[in-house]
Image (cartoon, helix red, strand yellow):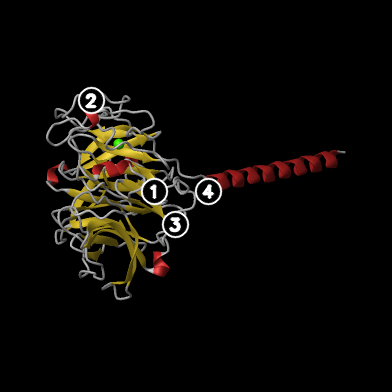
Amino acid sequence: MKYFNILAIMVLALFFASASCEEQKDSQKEENVETPIAQKPQAGTLPPVETQKANTNYTPAFEGQTRIAGVKTETPYEVTVLSSELSKPWAVTTLPDGRLAITEKAGNMRIATKEGSLSPKITGFPAVDDRNQGGLLDVAPAPDFETSRMLYFTFAEKTAQGSLTAVGKGKLSADETKIENFQTIFRAIPYFDNSMHFGSRIVFDKNGNIFVSTGERSDLKTRPNAQLLSTGHGKVIHITTEGKPVDGNPFINTEGALPEIYSYGHRNAQGLDIHPVTQELWLSEMGPRGGDEINLIKPGKNYGWPTITYGIEYSGQAISNGATQKEGLEQPVYYWDPVLSPSGMAFYSSNAIPEWQNNLFIGGLNSKHIARIVLKDNKVIGEERLLVGENQRFRDVGDGKDGALYAVTDEGRLYRIAKK
Ligand SMILES: [Ca+2]
């Protein structure tokens, strides 16, 4: 009996030892598969960054729609000018090998290393209308760029009938001197003879299709086109890499509507990006005097321009009798008065600067800074102004996916903003 008891105790001890070992392994396993906890968005506790008098006395539709509380980055970061040699750069985007593709408005591309060394001018583009706001505009690498070497572009197409925002694609040659076999795959009709409000940004969705923003061409004659589904002016377009409407587009079965349209009622959207976590599409657009907006884009929705706006004409006159809200029209998530002049924007996906994770960074032109926007539950909860002293018009901001942000300015600079 005695031996039996000892044996039983030994068996039990072994059992518990191995059980606790299993437990340990299990908890290790759990630790290994645990996804990193996303940084908590940091709500503003400081006074709003905007202190100037507004152009209008319009009332926001909800609290926090404008002049949100200020935030300040606590993590030390450094700002480096990598190059001052660019000629009117319009877009900066990261290639899979970590280098940067940069368009120049006159109609060529450059590739920059992350140390700021620039390639010669890459050619092979069609004639672009590079007066005023036109030119070779945005660039995005195909999701399979590493094997296909395909790049997608937006540009102001120049023709005898006027210009329009077009989307094209081409292959980066093996020696990286030119774009081969450039093809135009979409045109935001109609042509119009001026050089203003082309939009435009291009982003790939998770299915490998393309979103493109277009402008309403600024003129009082074309402005109403933003509300018309029969034109490509003032829209977000959703197309395949062949330029065909994406299956399931909201107006694909609507008679008289362009089947490529995804959303409408936009003025001049030069910022477009997909949220790294929610995968939702966000857009920034230029308002008139006052009334720059951030919008969360949903299929088929009408974003209001020019029926409703928080801005006024440059002359000071009201637009649409001062209407800022109307049933069935979307409210901006956020607006500025006076304006930011928002151009390109990017979500920061890294946690190298923890409080920046999933924040939105928008290049400001007239305002000459980069706006850092903290979002929570699709509302803005904090705003900060970065690179205020640089005195540059920030044309585009790109997420380097290496913990750094990259920005280009109308004055020809390439910036790197990263943790110190
Ligand atoms: Ca709007």
Q: Disc 4, disc 3: CB below 8 Å?
A: no
The local crowd at label 1, few if under 14, some if 14 to 19, many if 20 or more residues have their Cα within 10 Å, is many
| C-alpha distance separating marks 2 and 1 | 30 Å
Which label sits in the foreground, 3 or 2?
Answer: 2
Q: Is residue 72 visible in this depiction of the protein? A: no
**Residue underneath mark 1:** 261
| C-alpha distance separating marks 1 and 3 | 17 Å
The residue located at (27%, 41%) in the rendering is: 224
Quadrant for residue 314, please give it. Answer: top left
Quadrant for residue 67, please give it. Answer: top left
Disc 1 marks a residue whose amino acid type is: Ile
Q: Name the disc covering residue 25, or none.
A: none
Q: Residue furthest bottom?
A: 175
**Residue underneath mark 4:** 32
Q: Position of residue 93 (x, y in %)?
A: 30, 57
Q: Is residue 351 left or right of residue 36?
A: left
> Up-down: is 393 above or below 241?
above
Give the SS element for disc 1: strand
Q: Is mark 2 within 8 Å of ligand 1?
A: no
**Residue underneath mark 2:** 58
**Residue underneath mark 3:** 208
Q: Is residue 323 visible in this depiction of the protein? A: yes
Give the SS element for disc 3: loop
| C-alpha distance separating marks 2 and 4 | 52 Å
Q: Position of residue 64 (x, y in %)?
A: 30, 27
| C-alpha distance separating marks 1 and 4 | 44 Å
The residue located at (41%, 61%) in the rendering is: 241
